[in-house]
Amino acid sequence: MLAIEGGRPVRPRGSFLVFGAPAIGEEEIAAVVDSLRKRWIGTGPKVAKFERDFAAYKGAHHAIAVGSCTAALHLSLLSLNLEPGDEVVTTSMTFCSTVNAILHAGAKPVLADCDRRTMNLTAETIEAHLTSRTRAIIVVHMCGRVCPMPEILALARRRGLVVIEDCAHAIEATCEGIGAGRLGELGCFSFYATKNLTTAEGGMILTASADTADRLRRLALHGLSADAYRRFSDAGYRHYFMTQPGFKYNMTDIQAAIGIEQLRKVETHWQRRAQIWQEYKAAFEDLPCYLPPRMPEGSRHGYHLFTPLLDLDRLSVSRDRILQAMTAENIGVGVHYLPVHAHPYYASGWDWKRGDFPNAEFIGDRTISLPLTGDLSPRAVGDVITAFRRVLTYYHR
């Protein structure tokens, strides 16, 4: 008997398994305390070190730390000098911030459908929506799977378009040996609390252009010619000037302190998530659901989300009932994502309607995300497997 039907839950009361709880250790706690004791809590030396460390990990020329991935996307778009009426193509299968950033940059978002298996954009789905006003493409590497970038980049070159990568799910991922975030002109990363590498809130932009990096740094801190660390460091006070109206998008040393320690563990956590991923796939093969696909040979999965798609034709209840049943078993779950055009603002204020993006809608109606973090214990993994098998078996037609 399921807990939602009156039975005993898999995990006892008081031991709810929180979805996406960050893998925080004593090292991160000590690093934050160190920043507090040194009393440099704003943008300072630890932000500079985190940028250097992250650039080295990714093999990138320049890394600019910012307050969120949304800020990273917004600034990346602003660096393109978009004009009113310019269009940016992206996917409907993404978090709303991807499309919001396009609006904030003053451009027109144009949605494309995704591949039903990978949940990613393809060159074919993008090309169908290109016009003479298209200036850029934002690809979203869903769940840790990198989009088919060789074909997308070839299309962008033919059409003279800039490619921005939304790598919120793909810190560790690669495509044919090249790290996500280095394939397009700009790569944007998220360090939100649920991400593989967290700073509580935060983001990063990668670019190979020194001029673009310099402009992004200015835009991220009011448009000032020198950041706070350079103005007040032991090198002596430096005068600063506002060179353009910028934003308050900078990262703090407290955030960077966490990020530096998290980066040291990123490969260990990736290995643990890869192990859990394989355990899930082996445990769920016979259930009424479609399991996530493998990456192409030579590319690396980021293992950020494990998202089986429920086979509703073989289940007697809706996806939302499955979500409720898992919660009743004291297992936290998520939904990644409802398609952008299904949200009230975009559904009512734009020309998009149900039926326009059938693959994104198929995914959005069926997807469920199971816990997948780098410090998930064997017992917790076993509880997730037991609960998911119990729920889907109970509601199997």
Image: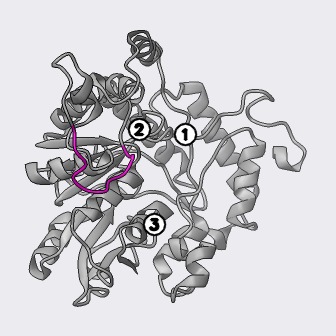
Q: Which mark is residue 20?
A: 1
- Mark 2 or mark 1, which has the lower sequence index? 1
Residue identifier under label 2: 196
Dot in front, 3 or 1: 3
Percent of width and height locating residue 207: 16, 51
Q: Residue at x 75, y 53 (%)?
A: 324
Which is the main secondary structure of the residues drawn in magenta?
loop
The alpha-carbon separation of the residues under discs 3 and 1 comes to 23 Å
Compared with 392, 123 (above or below) is below
**356 left or right of 61?**
right
**73 left or right of 373?**
left
- Circle 1 residues within 10 Å: few <14, some 14–19, many ≥20: many
Q: Residue at x 46, y 36 (%)?
A: 276
Which quadrant of the view contains residue 85?
bottom left
- Mark 3 or mark 2, which has the lower sequence index? 3
- Mark 3 or mark 1, which has the lower sequence index? 1
Q: Assign a secondary structure to mark 1.
A: loop
The alpha-carbon separation of the residues under discs 2 and 1 comes to 9 Å
Q: Write the start and end of the magenta stretch as one range.
A: 240-249
- Circle 2 residues within 10 Å: few <14, some 14–19, many ≥20: many
Res. 123 visible in picture: no
Q: Are marks 3 and 2 in contact (CB under 8 Å)?
A: no
Q: Assign a secondary structure to mark 2.
A: loop
Which quadrant of the view contains residue 289?
bottom right
* Quadrant for the C terminus in the image: bottom right
**297 left or right of 308?**
left
Percent of width and height locating residue 335: 58, 57
Residue identifier under label 3: 100
Label total for image: 3
